[in-house]
Image (cartoon, rainbow, N blue to C red):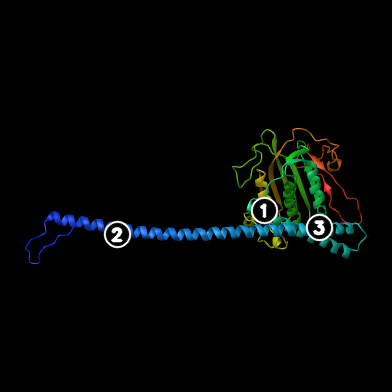
């Protein structure tokens, strides 16, 4: 709208004309504002698209780097396993020969260092698999009692070096066979028991296994979680107690973090990669369970408890199918102990008088 008046005109603006001009001016201002907003949004859209393209490229590069790292770790783990097994096996055989005290000490150091290196490489590989979600449980029937025997045999050399007694107790209701990931279950037990041995200077380590009942066991730090068995499955609960250095309240919250170490002076004396308990928690989570530690304080020992869900086989396996894997029949123990007179126990004694060995005693 254009209104033209001569310069010498005496005509005055009327009210409705002024209102009309104001309305047109407001509309022009709104249109200009919308145009500016549209231009700004288009610039923001273009910038967001550029950032998305850059992020997508960075994600692909990161995925390629992770795959390359995992491939490298897998190859290194495989290549290191054979020579490390030879070192451990030959060192163990050397311990069975007649040695001087100095020679025995050196071979025991080789065994402990080899065990640490194997554990470190395996833990790093498992952490990588857990990080990218490629780790899956290998569910199959297995001999549960034999798994405990294998764990005891594996921790035997380390406990023998420190002259610690290892006591194992299996509850009478614990089935001899179960369905689950035997390898990961053993890895959890080895990590927890190995951690107890590492931080125990003298005394003993006790391992007790039973079936968890509803509301009978719960994590004090996660009170809403407790095992509830169902048809065809049960919850295995394992407690590992030691007479070691214990854990202070300030360190309890950090025990399951990767590369975590306690702050007290006793804990700092021990080397470790800080991955064992972190891995154990992840494995326990995959097996629909939980794990926690309890300690009355520094110097008062520690109790590690975990439970995992296992399946119950429909048919009992043939006892003659693989006799090497089967344990000797367990007999009820009549002795007094913290787990009652009905508990079953494993008692294995090493009779070689030439070298110190771990004692396996009943705690039932």
Q: How many marks?
A: 3
**Mark 2 Cα within 10 Å, few/some/many (few <14, many 20+)?**
few
| Numbered badge on residue 327 | none
Q: Earlier in the sequence, mark 3 or mark 1?
A: 3
Tag 3's secondary structure?
Answer: helix
Pointer 1 residue: 129
Residue 122 in the image: x percent, y percent? 73, 55
Residue farthest along the right direction in this orientation: 98
> What quarter of the picture does the N terminus occupy?
bottom left
User: Residue 29: x and y, percent?
Assistant: 26, 59
> x, y percentage for residue 95?
88, 58
Q: Residue at x 12, y 55 (%)?
A: 15
Instruction: Tell me what residue is drawn at x 11 percent, y 59 percent.
Output: 13
Q: Which residue is mark 2?
A: 32
Mark-to-mark CA distance, 2 and 3? 75 Å
- Residue 22: give x, y in percent of width and height: 20, 57
Mark drawn on residue 82:
3
């Amino acid at each position: 709208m254009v209104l033209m008046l001569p310069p010498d005109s005496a005509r005055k603006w009327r009210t409705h004309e002024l209102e009309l001009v104001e309305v047109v001016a407001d509309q022009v201002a709104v249109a200009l504002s919308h145009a500016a907003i549209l231009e700004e949004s288009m610039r923001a859209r273009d910038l967001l698209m550029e950032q998305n393209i850059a992020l997508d490229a960075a994600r692909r590069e990161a995925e390629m780097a992770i795959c390359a790292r995992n491939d490298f770790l897998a190859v290194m783990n495989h290549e290191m396993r054979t020579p490390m097994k030879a070192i451990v096996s030959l060192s163990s055989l050397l311990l069975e020969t007649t040695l001087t005290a100095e020679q025995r000490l050196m071979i025991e150091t080789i065994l402990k260092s080899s065990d640490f290196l194997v554990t470190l490489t395996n833990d790093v590989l498992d952490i990588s698999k857990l990080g990218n979600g490629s780790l899956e449980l290998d569910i199959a029937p297995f001999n549960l009692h034999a798994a405990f025997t294998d764990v005891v045999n594996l921790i035997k050399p380390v406990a023998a070096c420190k002259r610690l007694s290892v006591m194992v107790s299996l509850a009478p209701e614990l089935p001899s066979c179960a369905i689950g990931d035997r390898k990961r279950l053993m890895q959890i037990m080895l990590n927890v028991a190995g951690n107890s041995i590492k931080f125990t200077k003298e005394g003993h380590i006790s391992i007790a296994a039973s079936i968890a009942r509803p509301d009978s066991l719960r994590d004090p730090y996660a009170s809403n979680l407790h095992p509830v068995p169902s048809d065809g499955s049960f919850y295995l609960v394992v407690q590992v107690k030691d007479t070691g250095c214990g854990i202070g309240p300030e360190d309890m919250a950090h025990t399951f973090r990767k590369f975590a170490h306690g702050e007290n002076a006793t804990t700092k004396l021990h080397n470790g990669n800080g991955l064992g308990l972190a891995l154990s928690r992840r494995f326990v989570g995959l097996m629909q369970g939980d794990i926690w530690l309890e300690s009355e304080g520094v110097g008062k020992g520690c109790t590690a408890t975990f439970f995992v869900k296992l399946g119950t086989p429909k048919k009992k396996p043939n006892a003659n199918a693989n006799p090497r894997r089967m344990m000797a029949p367990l007999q009820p123990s009549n002795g007094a102990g913290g787990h009652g007179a009905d508990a079953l126990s494993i008692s294995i004694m090493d009779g070689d008088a030439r070298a110190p060995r771990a004692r396996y005693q009943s705690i039932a």
